[in-house]
Amino acid sequence: MNDQIEISLGEEKRGYERVWGLNTRVEELFPWIDAYIALVVRPFREEAGVKQLVHHLLTFAAFCEEVYGVRNITMVRDEDLLTWERELERNQKPSTAHAYLDTVRRFFLWMKGVAPHLVKVNNRSSPQREATTPYLTSPQLTALKKTARTRVFERSFTSPQRPMRDRAIVLLLLELGVGREEVTELTLDAVNVPDVTPPTLYAFAQDDEAMMRIGERVRRGLSLELRHALVDYILTERTGDGGTTDSSEPLFLSASNRTTRATSGKLSPRAINLLLSTLLQEHNEREGEEENKIPSLTPRILRRTYDEWYSR
């Protein structure tokens, strides 16, 4: 754990022990950050990912201390997150600023579950961000899903493209509102099956009550299209790219014939943007109807589309 957090907790040992039992009277920010990292993040992330999230949360804690002079979680409001967002965007790349904000918003979402009376943050995107981020119209959404399906039947393992994988990822982003980093951190056990065999996976595809584990959350109500897309990918492209039945392996793998492939085969967050860019180009080339063409396709646009069409 980060040294700064350890020092902070050492100064408030009694409070730390109560927080570990999730005593809801503790208002100091650092013990809650430490509990969140230990209970929610560390069991599901590699050490590099843990360090990154710790850094995001420490940066936010430093901002709170600068604004209020204390690290009291009850004093944080939506307006403060908006101010911090503007500060990040002045000093960071957009993708980096988004990652910082996403970490902090997930932290407050967890806090609302364990100590709602301490949290004054509504955990929504800023009105400016919502107003300026476009989303897919219903015709565009239908047409994009059709393009993703069509690409599957034209696949070739001599190409680094993986249309089955890409289709499953796009549906996860759209239908569950999963973030880009979350997709790359998913392991095989995110698909909630007792074993990774064809009969079990086929049963998962047909089960209307099938579940996925996304970080600390369990998501139900997966669409039939999403379930089939996941199973098709796991049994074909993933196996062809060296995937095994080890539940700790990444769920989504880079193509095995890529020279820049990570040792673990894990996709990078940037790869998500690249596959969306490729899908967008092919979609607009295939699509004859002007209203179905899409000007831009990014993880943020798909998240906004989720908020507009699926989260309701």
Image: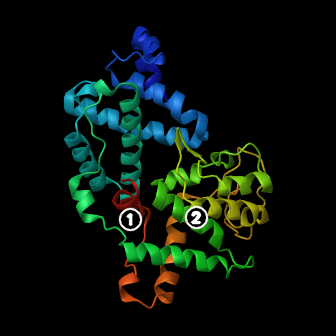
Q: Nearer the viewer, mark 1 or mark 2?
A: 2
- Image quarter of residue 74: top left
Residue in the image at 49% along x and 82% along y: 283
Q: Which residue type does callout 2 highlight?
A: Glu
Q: Measured along the vertical axis of the image, is residue 21 above or below residue 190? A: above
- Image quarter of residue 12: top left
Residue 159 at x, y = what percent?
Answer: 70, 78
Q: Which residue type does callout 1 highlight?
A: Ile
> The residue tagged with tag 2: helix, strand or loop?
helix
Residue 172 visible in rendering = yes
Q: Which of 231 and 77 lies nearest the eye of the viewer?
A: 231
Residue picked out by circle 2 = 225
Disc 2 packing (10 Å; few <14; some 14–19; many ≥20): some
Name the residue furthest top.
14
Q: Is residue 275 left or right of residue 202?
A: left
Residue 146 at x, y = what percent?
Answer: 53, 77
- Image quarter of residue 66: top left
Q: Which of 33 and 292 lies nearest the eye of the viewer?
A: 292
Q: Measured along the vertical axis of the image, is residue 104 above or below residue 228? A: above
Residue in the image at 72% along x and 45% along y: 247
Q: Measured along the vertical axis of the image, is residue 45 above or below residue 208? A: above
Residue 187 at x, y = what percent?
Answer: 65, 48
Residue 1 visible in rendering = no
Residue picked out by circle 1 = 301
Number of marks in the rendered image: 2
The tag earlier along the polypeptide, 1 or 2, is 2
Name the residue furthest bottom.
288
Disc 1 packing (10 Å; few <14; some 14–19; many ≥20): some
Q: Which of 7 and 166 lies nearest the eye of the viewer?
A: 166
Q: Which of 8 and 286 lies nearest the eye of the viewer?
A: 286
Give how far apart the Cα atoms at labels 1 and 2 are. Answer: 21 Å
Residue 217 at x, y = what percent?
Answer: 51, 40
